[in-house]
Image (spheres, coloured by chain):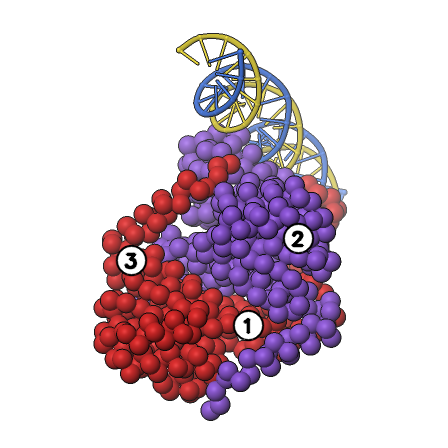
Chain colours: A red, B purple, C yellow, D blue
DNA sequence: CAAGTTAATGTGGATTTTTTTCATCTGCGT
DNA sequence: ACGCAGATGAAAAAAATCCACATTAACTTG
């Protein structure tokens, strides 16, 4: 992309003739009118001829009014975008915030959670987990509360690409399953705080049985984190105005996706075949437009 | 309307005719050609008539090709700006991408899905749904596959703030439940494509029983979207390299959070009390450092 | 399976918009 | 006052967009 229209315009400002100057001033003052106006309307607005407008566009380095107009449209959104970047709604959500405020703030927090989780992720650990999963005959996944949903999600995805995996909601069932696991298998525990008793128990038992233990938690130094062979850390901070887990769950799911895509990469053909088959399987449960 | 062209286009994608679809695909794949092409050139490039291009532009909500082109120019710069932040190329994920590339690209797509969902959200519909939920004696939630997890998540959250809600995995159970629902109650159907037979059935029955019907879907013009009284639209694009639902599920959960926070705001004291109580309830299942 | 019906697509011309040409005007120096 | 150079506007020419209508394709129904 060449230099900004506004820059080009401002630089030429002193060299312009009277009519062109009038147009340029108007445009710089309120660029949006260019987007909304044809060359005729803009000319009339500035009380000059269309030809003058056309000449200004060319003298600013554009082929004509058309491309000038598009450049202005671009430049406006570029300015908007960089403004938005600084007007980040890092503030906490309050009881009197408008719907727009709420939506923007929540979205911002969650987008940030994903981004920060990605940036802070230990890629070596990630690929170690991927390797462990790939070699495992069975994968047990466990989480309670909202982390239970992440567990289910991971289970579904692993299952879809052809890996035997189980996610347990019931702690007793989980314990009986992992008690019988073996070296080479993988047990994955998910807990935002890393403090959940059930989840810790499950990973302890799995470790004792020789499985590779993986923790997905926001706090690597938590009991759960210290317990596990491999730790994948999410980076989310919950708003005080929470209705339970928001960002933490999003960050966990993002992590699940990193894992699955990475797994998928390793066995492209085979995994894609699995995906195609599972997709076809539900095809006749779909309506048509 | 600040809603992004690309969002509008992607949401209408499945509802488009063959010729329009071809154009839309081409545009989404390489948007810059629109900026460089007249309507004739673009038509020739896609091997369709100019009229079809014009029709697509109108069906995407623009007055014609002119304004469509400007919107594309804007949207391109917006995308560029946000990509710069992630320092990620626009290429899709490939089998040979490094772990870092994969993580950043997935994170970018998911963060983008959240942001675009927020940006394009119909706030009036959102608050209408919030009102309906608040007044309802019972809320039935239904989704299959990965949308089933969203359904569970929403159910958990509503439940936690003291609303009677049910999420059904089994279509039969769901149908028997909504068949007995009543006017004033709310039925929420979740489906990314809006095509799932079971989910459509459920909402149809609920509507017949007089409940307020809500659809959460990426495609407002899908059968499900057309069926519902109120539609909340997600704005996600799936990577071609998908392991099932990634961005779509994240966007759905973001939507769930918008809903719950908004609900929570309305009844600050009472809901916060519920949250505190439920938090305390699991307290002695937490370890200490 | 054919006829009828409806939706989708393309053609060509009407209309709008942009570009270019050229005549006129303004200001300035001689 | 005259002539010249650059600036400006009017209008013609060119280009592009939009629209009405014809045609084709797809689908339904008897």
Q: Are marks 3 and 2 in contact (CB under 8 Å)?
A: no
Q: Secondary structure at mark 1?
A: loop
The residue carrying mark 1 is A245
Q: Determine crowd level at label 1: few under 14, some 14-19, many 20+ residues with C-alpha closer than 10 A.
A: some
Q: Determine crowd level at label 3: few under 14, some 14-19, many 20+ residues with C-alpha closer than 10 A.
A: some
Q: Determine crowd level at label 2: few under 14, some 14-19, many 20+ residues with C-alpha closer than 10 A.
A: many
Whether labels 3 and 2 belong to a single chain: the reply is: no
Q: Secondary structure at mark 2?
A: strand
Q: Earlier in the sequence, mark 1 or mark 3?
A: 3
- Picture quadrant of residue B18: top left
**What distance separates the C-alpha of mark 1 from that of mark 3?**
30 Å
Closest to the camera, between mark 2 and mark 1, is: 2
Q: Secondary structure at mark 3?
A: loop
**What distance separates the C-alpha of mark 2 from that of mark 1?**
24 Å
The residue carrying mark 2 is B186
Q: Quick check: can you spot residue A128?
A: no
Residue drawn at x 40%, y 74% as measured from the top left: A172
Q: Are marks 1 and 3 in contact (CB under 8 Å)?
A: no
**Relative to D28, residue B115 above or below:** below
Q: Chain of mark 1?
A: A
Q: Are marks 2 and 1 in contact (CB under 8 Å)?
A: no
Residue B33 image point, x, y percent:
45, 45
- Picture quadrant of residue A82: bottom right
**Relative to B181, residue C15 above or below:** above
Residue B229 horizontal side relative to residue B20, left or right: right
Residue B211 image point, x, y percent:
68, 48
Judge by depth and name the residue closer to the eye, A41 or B51. B51
Whether labels 1 and 3 belong to a single chain: the reply is: yes
Closest to the camera, between mark 3 and mark 2, is: 2
Tag shown at residue B115: none
The residue carrying mark 3 is A162
Residue C10 image point, x, y percent:
47, 24
């Amino acid at each position: 992309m060449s230099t900004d229209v506004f820059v080009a315009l401002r630089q030429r400002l002193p060299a312009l003739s009277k009519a062109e100057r009038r147009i340029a001033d108007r445009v710089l003052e309120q660029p949006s009118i260019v987007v909304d106006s044809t060359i005729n309307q803009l000319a009339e607005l500035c009380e000059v001829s269309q030809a003058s407008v056309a000449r200004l566009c060319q003298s600013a380095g554009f082929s004509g009014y058309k491309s000038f107009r598009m450049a202005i449209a671009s430049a406006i959104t570029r300015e908007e975008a960089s403004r938005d970047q600084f007007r980040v709604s890092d503030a906490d959500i309050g009881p009197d915030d408008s719907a727009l405020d709420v939506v923007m703030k929540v979205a911002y927090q969650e987008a940030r959670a994903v981004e920060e989780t990605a940036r802070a992720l230990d890629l070596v650990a990630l690929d170690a987990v991927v390797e462990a999963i790939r070699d495992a005959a069975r994968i047990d996944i466990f989480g309670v509360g909202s982390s239970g949903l992440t567990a289910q999600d991971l289970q579904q995805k692993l299952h879809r690409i052809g890996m035997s995996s189980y996610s347990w909601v019931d702690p007793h069932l989980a314990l009986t399953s992992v008690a019988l696991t073996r070296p080479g298998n993988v047990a994955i525990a998910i807990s935002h705080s890393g403090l959940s008793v059930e989840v810790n128990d499950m990973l302890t038992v799995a470790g004792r049985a020789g499985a590779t233990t993986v923790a997905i938690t926001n706090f690597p130094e938590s009991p759960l984190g210290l317990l596990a062979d491999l730790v994948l850390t999410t980076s989310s901070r919950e708003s005080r105005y929470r209705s339970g887990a928001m960002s933490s769950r999003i960050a966990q799911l993002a992590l699940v996706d990193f894992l699955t895509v990475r797994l998928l990469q390793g066995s492209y053909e085979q995994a894609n075949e699995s995906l195609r088959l599972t997709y076809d399987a539900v095809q006749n449960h779909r309506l048509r437009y």
